[in-house]
Image (spheres, rainbow, N blue to C red):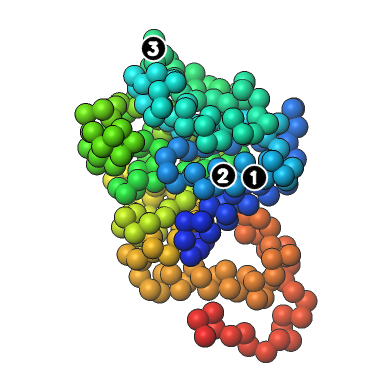
């Protein structure tokens, strides 16, 4: 697992948007071989989505051959409700991209059979060959998608009862009235996310510092479902300085030093996008000792 630390929310958003752009462009998707992207909602990805829109408008990125699957949707909200995740995604991202509507997949919280809707969602993912990259955010209690504390780490797309903490956190989108917040949602499971060939999670803000510390410095735990990323072969967390407040100083220095070593000894030109080393700089063993990253 990699941890990339940036100064603030804007830098995190820029890093992740550039990362997705490069992943899609290197993949070179076609109609026969589309890039399949998993996407979240909430406040975490808005900056990233704004940057992706800019890339599309400037011609640096195309969603023509990208298929998307969203993480979750409230149960009982009409699709056109201002706070439905259908509305969120089309307002903040899809309406501004050259993506084909038939390539957008969002769970239907008003389906006549919710269990069948969830099973079909999993089947759709399988039919397109699985998800190439799943982007996610977390709540203050470390939940990814709506996989609340205590969720099975082998869970699949299903109906989920929202934790009281999540309902309180989401009340800001419903005029501050927790009574208006839906109590049920459809959500991809932890295993659905972790089955993706790559998982990228953004974590920002001091209010998520404990969750980040639990994810990075403690073991895999179903009470902090984002911790499952520890078991993923290509897991990446991009966070800001505020969210590292509960990490040990040596942990922060360790992950920052890795990035420093890569830049100083290997060079970005010799690194793959996912952190693999193609080669080291040929002059590296003739260089004087490098400066400590904190000098």
Q: Are marks 2 and 3 in contact (CB under 8 Å)?
A: no
Label 2 sits on residue: 50
Q: Does residue 165 lie above or below 184 as drawn? A: below
For the residues labelled 3 and 1, the Cα–Cα distance comes to 38 Å
Q: Is residue 124 visible?
A: yes
Query: What residue lies at 68% left-to-right and 71% top-to-bottom?
Result: 266
Local crowd size for mark 3, using a 10 Å CA cut-off: few (<14), some (14–19), many (≥20):
few
Q: Nearer the viewer, residue 55 or 239?
A: 55
Q: Nearer the viewer, residue 204 or 126?
A: 204
Q: Are marks 1 and 2 in contact (CB under 8 Å)?
A: yes
Q: Nearer the viewer, residue 107 or 98?
A: 98
Locate residue 117 relative to residue 90 in the image: left or right: left
Locate residue 29 relative to residue 220 in the image: left or right: right
For the residues labelled 2 and 3, the Cα–Cα distance comes to 34 Å
Label 3 sits on residue: 113
Query: What residue lies at 74% left-to-right and 27% top-to-bottom?
Result: 31
Residue 283 drawn at (x, y percent):
76, 81
Label disc, if present, on residue 203 of the rendered structure: none
For the residues labelled 1 and 2, the Cα–Cα distance comes to 6 Å
Could you tell me which secondary element the residue under label 3 belongs to? loop
Q: Quadrant of residue 157?
A: top left
Label 1 sits on residue: 54
Query: What residue lies at 21% left-to-right and 29% top-to-bottom?
Result: 179
Q: Nearer the viewer, residue 169 or 189?
A: 169
Q: Does residue 274 lie above or below 50 as drawn? A: below
Q: Quadrant of residue 284?
A: bottom right
Could you tell me which secondary element the residue under label 2 belongs to? helix
Residue farthest along the right direction in this orientation: 282
Q: Quadrant of residue 244?
A: bottom left
Residue 216 drawn at (x, y percent):
40, 59
Q: Are marks 3 and 1 in contact (CB under 8 Å)?
A: no
Could you tell me which secondary element the residue under label 1 belongs to? helix
């Amino acid at each position: 697992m990699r941890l990339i630390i940036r100064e603030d929310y804007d830098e995190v958003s820029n890093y992740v948007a550039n990362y997705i752009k490069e992943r899609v462009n290197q993949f070179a998707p076609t109609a026969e071989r589309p890039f399949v992207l998993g996407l979240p909602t909430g406040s975490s990805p808005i900056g990233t989505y704004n940057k992706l829109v800019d890339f599309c408008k400037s011609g640096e990125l195309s969603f023509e051959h990208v298929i998307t699957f969203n993480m979750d949707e409230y149960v009982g909200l009409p699709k056109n409700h201002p706070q439905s995740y259908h509305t969120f995604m089309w307002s903040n991202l899809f309406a501004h991209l050259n993506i084909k509507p038939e390539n957008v997949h969002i769970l239907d919280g008003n389906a006549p059979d919710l269990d069948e809707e969830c099973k079909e969602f999993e089947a759709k993912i399988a039919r397109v060959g699985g998800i190439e990259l799943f982007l996610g955010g977390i709540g203050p209690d470390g939940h990814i998608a709506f996989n609340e504390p205590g969720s099975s780490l082998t869970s699949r797309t299903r109906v989920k009862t929202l934790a009281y903490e999540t309902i309180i956190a989401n009340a800001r989108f419903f005029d501050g009235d927790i009574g208006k917040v839906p109590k049920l949602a459809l959500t991809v499971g932890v295993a659905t996310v972790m089955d993706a060939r790559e998982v990228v999670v953004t974590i920002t803000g001091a209010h998520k510092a404990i969750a980040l510390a639990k994810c990075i410095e403690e073991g895999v735990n179903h009470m902090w479902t984002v911790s499952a990323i520890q078991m993923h072969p290509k897991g990446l967390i991009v966070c800001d300085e505020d969210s590292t407040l509960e990490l040990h100083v040596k942990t922060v220095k360790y992950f920052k030093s890795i990035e420093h070593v890569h830049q100083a000894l290997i060079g970005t030109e010799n690194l793959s996008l996912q952190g693999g080393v193609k080669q080291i700089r040929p002059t590296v063993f003739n260089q004087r000792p490098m400066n400590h990253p904190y000098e």
